[in-house]
């Protein structure tokens, strides 16, 4: 009994690690939020439409986890008051558009 309980818990804890980054999130909803909440700051820092933050050679994001953490950090630092699902949607959009993390 204890072994099967342990196995079930282990499987459940492993699911998020094996799922695609931002699984179940809406890239379309993320784009709308990104365009409203993020673009103006990125454009002010990088010029143009702000997308250079994602396409520059020395970009800092090397994994979906780093991207998710950066989105959370920006949300907190800027006081955007986005919900966790909004952050996941933004991550889905950025991953689909720029990063392509698996």
Image (cartoon, rainbow, N blue to C red):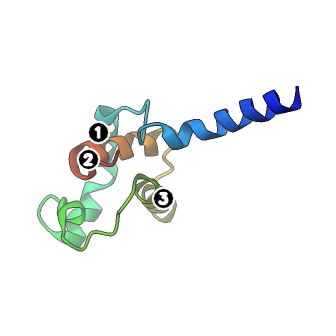
**Front one among 48 and 52:** 52
Q: Residue at x 31, y 36 (%)?
A: 27
Between the residue at mark 1 and the residue at mark 2, the CA separation in whole angstroms equals 5 Å
Find out whether the residues at labels 3 and 1 contact each other: C-beta distance under 8 Å: no
Neighbour tally class for label 1: few under 14, some 14-19, many 20 plus, Cα within 10 Å: some
Instruction: Please give the residue where the numbered disc 1 appears in the rendered image.
Output: 32
Residue 2, position in %: x, y?
88, 31
Q: Quadrant of residue 49?
A: bottom left
Secondary structure state at the residue bearing disc 2: helix
Instruction: Please give the residue where the numbered disc 3 appears in the rendered image.
Output: 69
User: Does residue 17 appear left or right of residue 2 in this picture?
Assistant: left
Between the residue at mark 2 and the residue at mark 3, the CA separation in whole angstroms equals 19 Å
Between the residue at mark 3 and the residue at mark 1, the CA separation in whole angstroms equals 20 Å
Q: Residue at x 52, y 60 (%)?
A: 76
Find out whether the residues at labels 1 and 2 contact each other: C-beta distance under 8 Å: yes
Q: Quadrant of residue 26?
A: top left
Q: Which of the two labelled residues, at mark 2 and mark 3, occupies the earlier sequence position?
A: 2
Q: Nearer the viewer, mark 3 or mark 1?
A: 3
Quadrant of the frame with the N terminus: top right
Residue 36, position in %: x, y?
30, 47
User: Does residue 46 appear left or right of residue 101 in this picture?
Assistant: left
Residue 30, position in %: x, y?
34, 39
Instruction: Please give the residue where the numbered disc 2 appears in the rendered image.
Output: 35
Neighbour tally class for label 2: few under 14, some 14-19, many 20 plus, Cα within 10 Å: few
Q: Which of the two labelled residues, at mark 3 and mark 1, occupies the earlier sequence position?
A: 1
Residue 99 tag number: none
Q: Residue at x 73, y 29 (%)?
A: 8
């Amino acid at each position: 009994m204890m072994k099967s309980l342990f196995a079930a818990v282990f499987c459940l804890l492993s699911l998020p690690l094996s799922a695609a980054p931002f699984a179940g999130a809406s890239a379309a909803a993320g784009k709308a939020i990104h365009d409203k909440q993020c673009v103006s700051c990125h454009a002010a820092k990088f010029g143009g439409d702000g997308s250079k933050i994602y396409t520059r050679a020395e970009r800092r994001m090397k994994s979906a986890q780093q991207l998710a953490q950066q989105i959370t950090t920006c949300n907190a630092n800027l006081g955007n008051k986005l919900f966790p699902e909004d952050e996941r949607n933004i991550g889905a959009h950025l991953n689909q558009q720029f990063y392509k993390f698996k």
